[in-house]
Image (cartoon, grey):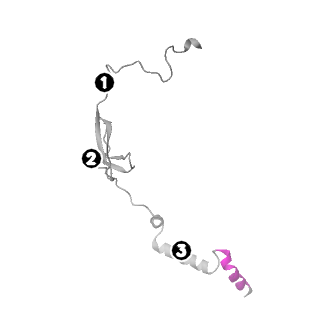
Amino acid sequence: MAERTLRGARLGGQSFEDERGIEFAARQQVGYRCPQEHEFEITMSVEADIPAVWECPRCGAEALSVSGIQPEVKAEKPARTHWDMLLERRSVKELEDILKERLELLRGGEIGPAHLHRGSKKKSVSA
């Protein structure tokens, strides 16, 4: 195993490569300003799509680009409520009929919590 080790190098040692002949990617500085008036710059590639919004490193708020790029406005669907979904299945007239039926059953003691109807059932049986 000793013959496979690298001689003269150590873990975390220095690299012997230099930067000659290396062409770095073109970069640009993009400025942002948050609602707290914190201004900062992010280094990005020239080829990158510049986002209109970036998280502020100081306060975490959404910072807007100072170059005037506006965030895209997303078309939001209105939230579907339970009532909306119910109206997709039944008409208002049908719902009123069902409510009337259920109220009659509830008042008659046929449905609902047992502790509310114990006395009324005994009275109706003995009568």
The x and y percentages for residue 49 are 31, 40
Residue with the mark numbered 3: 98
Instruction: Name the foreground residue: 108 vs 31.
Output: 31
Q: Is residue 120 left or right of residue 81?
A: right
Instruction: Name the foreground residue: 98 vs 45.
Output: 45
**Cα distance, mark 2 to mark 3?**
59 Å
Q: Farthest residue toward the left?
A: 68
Q: Are marks 1 and 3 in contact (CB under 8 Å)?
A: no
The x and y percentages for residue 121 are 70, 81
Residue with the mark numbered 1: 23
Badge 3 crowding class, 10 Å Cα cut-off, few under 14, some 14 to 19, many 20 or more, is: few
Quarter of the image that includes the C terminus: bottom right
Predominant SS along the magenta part: helix
Q: Is residue 88 left or right of residue 114?
A: left
**Cα distance, mark 1 to mark 2?**
29 Å
Q: Secondary structure at mark 3?
A: helix
Indicate which disc, 1 or 3, sits on the residue closer to the N terminus: 1
Residue with the mark numbered 2: 66
Residue 85 vertical position relative to residue 61 in the rendered view, above or below: below
Residue 17 vertical position relative to residue 62 in the rendered view, above or below: above
Residue 93 vertical position relative to residue 77 in the rendered view, above or below: below
What residue range appears in magenta? Answer: 113-125
Q: Judge whether residue 46 can be spotted in this image.
A: no
